[in-house]
């Protein structure tokens, strides 16, 4: 007698930016079901529910995890890395990397010399794109100056957009891939914004599975992701998400993120 496994969960919480965009992710995950033969339940795990709760679930099958918190988990305890997206955007250069756009209100003009006088918004402190990336950008141009004021946590890109719209902050960082998705599907949401700069690249948030998942499930899901670009239907789904495909994650690149964050703290004299 065999025991039927419960469904593996799939979640794109980091990139569930609107119902329309969430629908595109649901389409991808349900396609993965058909390609891998794995029973998948798509869940929203909507904000403000902590992402840490999602990442600790033993039924994770394909869940996005930011590279910075992934890098801070001991190797023996980490979720299993499946694949990292490769964006079609120019900043990706065909690699599984992403960046952050420094954004401001479209009608608010300032020069690089003004950055220290502005109010900076940040999302959450364990975010590469919404916290470490803008701090690294500022540290590289600060010349010893400190920022006037920082405001957070704003939780996610939508929080940054809203804070700029209301005038609560002058400038903030939005995950460049999240911005790409909004350009594709919700252009009105970012219409009030302009991109001031783009930060250095970092390894893309990766899809992970729980260590408790059977190896057969993990292998089937990983294979379906890495081969998604090989079929016309897969390419169509990927294109709707602004992706060229998925690649095997470069774990060494993620392992360098904590040292990179420490260098930012050293340059800025501590956290924001």
Image (tube, rainbow, N blue to C red):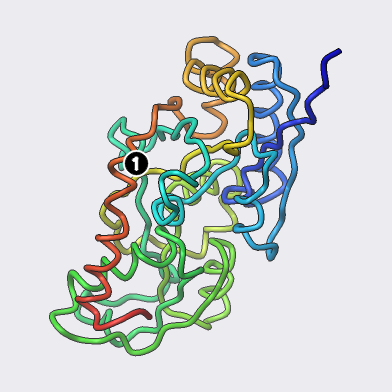
In the rendered view, would you say 166 is above or below 185?
Answer: below
In the displayed orientation, state which residue is furthest to the front: 1
- Residue at 40% x, 74% y is 171
Residue 66 location in percent, x, y?
A: 47, 51
Residue 17 location in percent, x, y?
A: 62, 52
In the displayed orientation, state which residue is furthest to the top: 231
Task: List the residue tagged with mark 1.
Answer: 97
In the rendered view, would you say 14 is above or below 149?
Answer: above
- Residue at 21% x, 76% y is 266
Residue 153 location in percent, x, y?
A: 54, 75
- Residue at 71% x, 32% y is 8
Q: Is residue 250 left or right of residue 225?
A: left
Q: Quadrant of the N terminus?
A: top right
In the displayed orientation, state which residue is furthest to the left: 143
In the rendered view, would you say 140 is above or below 116?
Answer: above
Count of marks overlaid on the render: 1
Residue nearer the viewer, 160 or 183: 160
Residue 114 location in percent, x, y?
A: 25, 82
In the displayed orientation, state which residue is furthest to the right: 1
* Crowd band around label 1 with a 10 angstrom C-alpha radius: few (<14), some (14–19), many (20+): many
Residue nearer the viewer, 127 or 143: 127
Query: Secondary structure beneath disc 1?
Result: strand
Quarter holding residue 24? top right
Quarter holding residue 139? bottom left
- Residue at 37% x, 37% y is 89
Q: Is residue 118 left or right of residue 25?
A: left
Q: Quadrant of the C terminus?
A: bottom left
Quarter holding residue 165? bottom right
């Amino acid at each position: 007698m065999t025991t039927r496994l419960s469904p593996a969960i799939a979640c794109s919480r980091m990139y569930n930016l609107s119902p329309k965009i969430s629908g595109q992710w649901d389409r991808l995950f349900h396609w993965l079901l058909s390609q891998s033969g794995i029973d998948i339940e798509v869940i929203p795990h909507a904000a403000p529910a902590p992402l840490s709760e999602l990442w600790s679930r033993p039924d994770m099958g394909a869940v996005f995890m930011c590279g910075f918190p992934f890098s801070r988990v001991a190797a023996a305890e980490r979720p299993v890395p499946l694949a990292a997206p490769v964006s079609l955007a120019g900043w990706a250069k065909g690699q599984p990397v992403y960046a952050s756009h420094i954004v401001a209100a479209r009608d608010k003009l300032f020069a690089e010399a003004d950055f220290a006088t502005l109010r900076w918004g940040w999302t959450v402190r364990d975010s590469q794109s919404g916290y470490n990336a803008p701090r690294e950008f500022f540290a590289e141009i600060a010349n010893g100056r400190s920022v006037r004021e920082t405001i957070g946590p704003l939780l996610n890109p939508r929080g940054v957009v809203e804070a700029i719209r209301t005038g609560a902050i002058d400038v903030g960082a939005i995950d460049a891939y999240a911005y790409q998705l909004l350009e594709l599907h919700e252009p009105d949401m970012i219409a009030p914004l302009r991109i001031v700069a783009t930060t250095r690249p970092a390894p893309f948030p990766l899809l992970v599975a729980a260590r408790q998942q059977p190896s057969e499930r993990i292998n089937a899901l990983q294979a379906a992701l890495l081969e998604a670009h090989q079929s016309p239907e897969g390419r169509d789904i990927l294109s709707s998400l602004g992706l060229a495909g998925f690649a095997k994650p470069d774990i060494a690149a993620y392992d360098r993120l904590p040292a990179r964050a420490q260098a930012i703290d050293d340059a800025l004299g501590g956290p924001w």
